[in-house]
Amino acid sequence: MTQRPLRILIIDENAVRAAILEEGLRVTNDENGEAPEIHHIRDMANLLARISAVDPDVILIDLENPNRATLEQMFQVSRLARRPVAMFVDKSDSATVQAAIDACVSAYVVDGLRKERVRSILDVTISRFQAFDRLQSELRQAKSALEDRKIIEQAKAILMQQRGCSESDAYVLLRRTAMNQNRKLAELARSLVAAAALLRPGADHE
């Protein structure tokens, strides 16, 4: 199956500045040696819907001298787009830089719009996004594993109390039942804990 070229979306109301970005991108080939597919948005109306329609792999936003309202709109785009985002501005301050970081902007470039830099900025943008995405995925997995362990401990405690068995016996029973029902251990544990809560005296009055 042939993969499509890298799809890059440029958001810029200034045609001259957008042309600088595009010129820098035209000498950028992806890992298959293909030139990127470049799209433009030149006004901010219905921005999220139009970004969704393009479905870009990377978003380059050039804001020149943005006001606070425009910056916040672009930060919102970065938070919701879940794509590598590079933002070019002419001037900035520490508070705005921090806001860009909080908005998950992968590269925030101040006074750096030169075609010779576009390739390296694009590479950094993608690399940073991928690294952050991996970290987020690992954190989600760790959180899920911790929640699973907690619910399994609760289910074991219920079995130990109701059956008068040891912790190891309760775990073996849970594991065997999960295998027999072709269910995940944590899924079975959640069902057991939920059922125990329903059967607890006075549960219908809580």
Image (cartoon, helix red, strand yellow):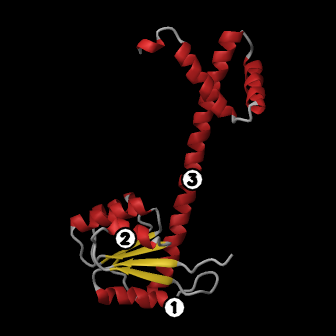
The residue carrying mark 2 is 50
Image spot of residue 38 (x, y percent): 45, 83
Disc number lying in front (3 or 2): 2
The residue carrying mark 1 is 27
Tally the numbered discs: 3
Q: CA distance from mark 1 to mark 2?
A: 26 Å
The residue carrying mark 3 is 137
On-image quarter of the C terminus:
top left
Looking at the image, which residue is at 63% across and 81% down? 31
Helix, strand or loop at label 3? It is helix
Task: Count residues near mark 3 (Cα–Cα under 10 Å), then give few for <14, some for 14-19, many for 20+.
Answer: few
**Going from the N terminus, do you reach mark 3 or mark 2 first?**
2
Q: Depth check: give the residue in front, 139 or 144.
A: 144
Task: Count residues near mark 1 (Cα–Cα under 10 Å), then give few for <14, some for 14-19, many for 20+.
Answer: few
Q: Tag 3: residue type?
A: Ser
Disc number lying in front (1 or 2): 2
Which numbered disc covers residue 154?
none
Verify CB contact (< 8 Å) between mark 1 and mark 2: no
Q: Relative to 24, say whether 107 is above or below.
A: above
Image spot of residue 145 (x, y percent): 62, 39
Q: Is residue 175 visible?
A: yes
Q: Is residue 97 visible?
A: no
Looking at the image, which residue is at 39% across and 64% down? 78
Looking at the image, which residue is at 45% across and 88% down? 24
Q: Tag 2: residue type?
A: Arg
Looking at the image, which residue is at 28% across and 62% down? 72
Q: CA distance from mark 3 to mark 1?
A: 33 Å
Image spot of residue 1 (x, y percent): 69, 75
Q: Relative to 188, say whether 70 is above or below.
A: below
Residue 179: quadrant of the picture: top right
